[in-house]
Amino acid sequence: MELKRSIVRKAGARSRRLERLVKGFANHRRIEILELLGKKSEMSVGEISLATEIELKTASEHLRRLAIAGIILKRHEGREVRHALTPRARNILTFLRMLE
């Protein structure tokens, strides 16, 4: 009985991790940002804001959520923060293209 509970707990934890990941990119603006970063190696929040035609504050919030989900990496370069995709994000982009 204890083994069964352990398996159920592990499955529940996995499901919650996957939910957090999916919620991290489940927004049309975040998908747009992922696609943009898929074409360029790194971009700043200002560059992303201009390219997507969204407010700087909004772009920053979307990037924050993507980072929390482990989908993008942030690298400090002087006063600027550069954003890049993780390998997981590249897999997500492939998955999203398959859905089209």
Image (cartoon, grey):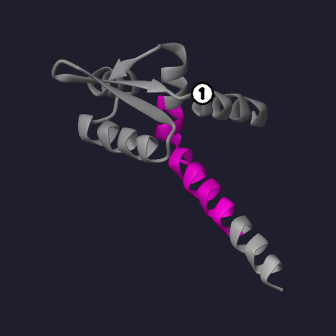
Residue 27: x and y in percent read 52, 46
Please tell me whether residue 63 is drawn above or below residue 81 in the rendered image: below
Task: Tell me, yes or no, whether the highlighted magenta stretch contains residue 100.
Answer: no
Q: Nearer the viewer, residue 97 or 43?
A: 43
| Residue at image point 47% right, 13% down | 40
Q: Quadrant of residue 67?
A: top left
Q: Which residues are magenta?
A: 12-33
The residue that mark 1 highlights is 87
| Left or right of 81 on screen, residue 97 | right
Task: Tell me, yes or no, whether the highlighted magenta stretch contains residue 24.
Answer: yes
| Kind of residue sitting beneath label 1 | Pro
Residue 25: x and y in percent read 54, 44
Secondary structure of the magenta portion, mostly? helix
| Residue at image point 71% right, 28% down | 94
Q: Quadrant of residue 45?
A: top left
| Left or right of 30 on screen, residue 60 | left
| Residue at image point 64% right, 30% down | 93
| Left or right of 10 on screen, residue 28 | left
Please tell me whether residue 56 is drawn above or below residue 42 in the rendered image: below
Q: Nearer the viewer, residue 5 or 34?
A: 5
* Quarter of the image where the N terminus is located: bottom right
Residue 54: x and y in percent read 33, 34
